[in-house]
Amino acid sequence: MGFVNQNIKPLNTKVNSKGNIEISGCDLVELAEKYSTPLYVMDRVTLEKMANDYKQAFSNYKNTRMMYASKALMTSAIASIFYKLGFGFDVVSLGEMYILKNAGIDLSHATFNGNNKGCDELEYAVLNNIARVSVDNFYELELLDNIAKKMNKVQKILLRITPGIECHTHEYIQTGQLDSKFGFDLHMIDEAIDLIQKQYKNLDLKGLHAHVGSQIFETKIFEDEIEVLLKEIRRIKDKFNIELNEVNIGGGLGITYVESDAPPNVYEVAEITIKAIEKYCALYELSEPVLYIEPGRSLVATAGVTLYTIGASKNIEGIRKYISVDGGMADNPRPSMYCAEYYAEIVNKKEGYNPEKVTVAGKFCESGDILIKDIELNSPKAGDTLCLYATGAYCYSMSSNYNGVLKPAMVLINEGKSDIIVRRQTLQQLVENDVVL
Ligand SMILES: Cc1ncc(COP(=O)(O)O)c(C=O)c1O
């Protein structure tokens, strides 16, 4: 048992006396029967353990602000849990801001990110006193200044920069490299600051923001990122005579989806981050800034699993056996989108072990709708419950109604109790915006 993000399964996952897998005292077969499948299951104990580890790991640097990256998984209940744990939020849309408000959380606890924020979104953010807007480009600088001026407000901002750092993760989840749609390139920063100082009087620049990518396994990346950010802050101080004292380093810590994944733990990341801040603040003679971190995946992924029921199968002699489940790319687009890998187990029948190599296919009308290619499962049969691990991040939040399926329910489990936190969509909801001619 390592740290949460180094495990594939939630804490307290075991085979119970009935021979079924249970998590946190909840039998997964019973959950599937009670709530039906596909079903997202979030384990509160695992989620809170990871959140508390983050807090503990960064407690040596007093000026740290934890901002949960809502894009990983945003529901009112999940937002409330993080809020109670002392987290703020990284939000990227009107919808995410609205969910926060729905959970009774003020936007003064949130940073607004994104490369093409809409006018309506920025207006909502400013009106509701968002703590920071991380401005991504020149277009947004002008738009936001106009909005703040109309409301007679001064909006606190960060500048999102592209630090020019490449990390070894999937191309689609890299964001810090030069050829990226996000942020100001380093050579654009001076022009942006010039405009803020001379023209955009309703913007108050507090610091710099970067995010180098997601599912990161190399701690060194965070050191490099801090070096770039603090070097820029020094340069800005010399040129413009202002000392920015906030740095937001984004999120990105990876998790173990399959055995070969080897992410660092959060204490290692915190140590290298804090040491880098101390080192570069000393080198560039800067006072230590407020540090914002925005983890998403590593906070929620391992706490979540998805339960499916196995249905049809197809055996192509000598080639492959497909077993199909009652969900797939609509509830988890990650494998078809960027070849993400997952581990799964049959939840029932844990007594004997008769491994069979199969490919787990979704039910959607795309050949690419494969959840797991080649995995050994315990004699999978129609009617068995399959548990796909580490689906807490970027699954529900990326889900769709493709093929007209209803989005699954989500339950929160906690020491033997289960509560619905997202109801299963209904057919009525599926057509509620449809206009019949
Ligand atoms: C700006 C920003 N912050 C934080 C995150 C969260 O990253 P992760 O879920 O990898 O921790 C992302 C993810 O894409 C991001 O773009």
Image: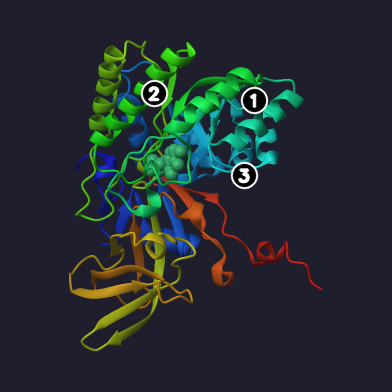
Q: Residue 250 in the image: state x and y as whole percent.
A: 41, 34
Looking at the rendered structure, the kind of residue marked 2 is Glu
Say if disc 2 is inside 8 Å of ligand 1: no
**Dot placed on the residue nearer the N-terminal end, 3 or 2:** 3
For image coordinates 37% across by 10% down, the residue present is 287
Can residue 103 be seen at all in this image of the molecule?
no
Residue with the most extreme bottom position: 317
Q: CA distance from mark 1 to mark 3?
A: 16 Å
Task: Give SS at disc 3.
Answer: helix
The amino acid marked with disc number 3 is Gly
Q: Is residue 409 above or below residue 336?
A: above
Residue displayed at 53% across by 23% down? 193
Residue beneath disc 1: 129
Between the residue at mark 3 and the residue at mark 2, the CA separation in whole angstroms equals 33 Å
Instruction: Specify whether residue 227 is in view.
Output: yes
Image-quadrant location for residue 427: bottom right
Q: Tell which circle, 1 or 3, labels the residue nearer the N-terminal end.
A: 3
Q: Residues within 10 Å of mark 1 (few under 14, many from 20)?
A: some
Q: Which residue is mark 2?
A: 232
- Displayed-image quarter of ligand 1: top left
Label 3 Cα crowd, 10 Å radius (few <14 / some 14-19 / many 20+): few
Q: Nearer the viewer, residue 202 or 170?
A: 202
Tell me the quarter of the picture where residue 260 sits: bottom left
Element assignment for label 2: helix
Q: Are marks 1 and 2 in contact (CB under 8 Å)?
A: no
State which tag comes first along the sequence, 1 or 2: 1
The residue to which callout 3 is attached is: 95
Q: Which element is circle 1 on?
A: loop
